[in-house]
């Protein structure tokens, strides 16, 4: 990560091409499961946590609630999520992943992580463990901690 003169390259400059390539590797796996990237993100968020309102889900995945409506419609039509009126606020909808949604998400995740495992195998074991440990630690930071 050093450039001419021994300076360290910016993290975003180093990671951005890697992330773009990882996303490109995920797209065929997601297509095979008839999922969009946002669909997978939504299923992952619902599978990893409690039932959420659309607004809370949008905040958790870092998007505007109006931008995910089409994704939610598609996931619901496919039987992968359910949307029910919130008893506390009938204008709001509670989202939950269905058992079929959980199966599709987990199957897609297996395919995605198989490629990641292939990539990680290119690193020596100690570097792989350190990389994963660092990624988990940095991912646990809040946006405010990262932005400063």
Image (tube, grey):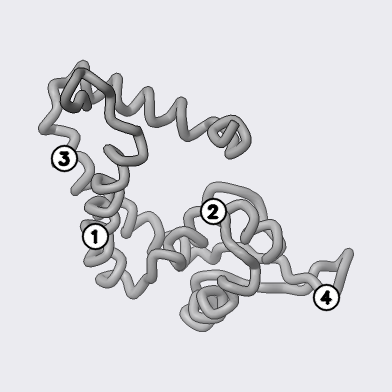
Q: If you read the primary sequence from the N terminus, does the residue marked by circle 3 or circle 4 appear first? A: 4
Q: Nearer the viewer, mark 4 or mark 1?
A: 1
37 or 85: nearer the viewer? 37
What label does residue 24 carry, if any?
1
Q: Residue at x 47, y 34 (%)?
A: 139
Q: If you read the primary sequence from the N terminus, does the residue marked by circle 4 or circle 2 appear first? A: 2
Which residue is at the far bottom?
Answer: 77
Residue placed under numbered mark 2 in the picture:
45
Q: How many residues crowd around disc 4 within 10 Å: few (fewer than 14), some, or many (20 or more)?
A: few
At numbered mark 3, what does the secondary structure look like: helix, strand or loop? helix
Q: Which of marks 2 and 1 is in front?
A: 1
Whether residue 113 is visible, yes or no, is no
Residue placed under numbered mark 4 in the picture:
91
Which residue is at the far front?
Answer: 5
Q: If you read the primary sequence from the N terminus, does the residue marked by circle 1 or circle 3 appear first? A: 1
Q: If you read the primary sequence from the N terminus, does the residue marked by circle 3 or circle 2 appear first? A: 2
Q: Which of marks 3 and 2 is in front?
A: 3
Residue placed under numbered mark 3 in the picture:
119
In the rendered view, tell whether residue 80 sits above or below residue 21: below
Q: How many residues crowd around disc 3 within 10 Å: few (fewer than 14), some, or many (20 or more)?
A: few
Residue 148 x, y percent position in the rendering:
60, 31
Q: How many residues crowd around disc 1 within 10 Å: few (fewer than 14), some, or many (20 or more)?
A: few
At numbered mark 2, what does the secondary structure look like: helix, strand or loop? helix
Residue 39 x, y percent position in the rendering:
45, 67
Quarter of image, res 61? bottom right
Cβ–Cβ under 8 Å for marks 2 and 1: no
As measured in the structure, the alpha-carbon distance from the residue carrying label 3 to the one carrying label 2 is: 24 Å
């Amino acid at each position: 990560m050093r450039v001419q003169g021994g300076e360290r390259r910016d993290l975003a400059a180093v990671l951005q091409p890697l992330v773009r390539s990882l996303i490109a590797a995920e797209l065929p796996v997601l297509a095979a499961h008839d999922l969009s990237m946002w669909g997978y993100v939504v299923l992952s968020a619902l599978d990893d946590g409690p039932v959420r309102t659309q607004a809370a889900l949008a905040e958790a995945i870092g998007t505007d609630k109006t931008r995910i409506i089409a994704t939610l419609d598609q996931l619901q039509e496919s039987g992968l999520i359910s949307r029910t009126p919130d008893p506390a606020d009938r204008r709001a909808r509670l989202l939950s992943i269905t058992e079929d949604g959980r199966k599709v998400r987990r199957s897609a995740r297996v395919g995605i992580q198989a490629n990641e495992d292939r990539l990680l195998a290119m690193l020596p074991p100690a570097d792989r463990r350190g990389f994963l440990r660092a990624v988990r630690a940095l991912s646990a930071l809040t946006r405010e901690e990262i932005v400063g």
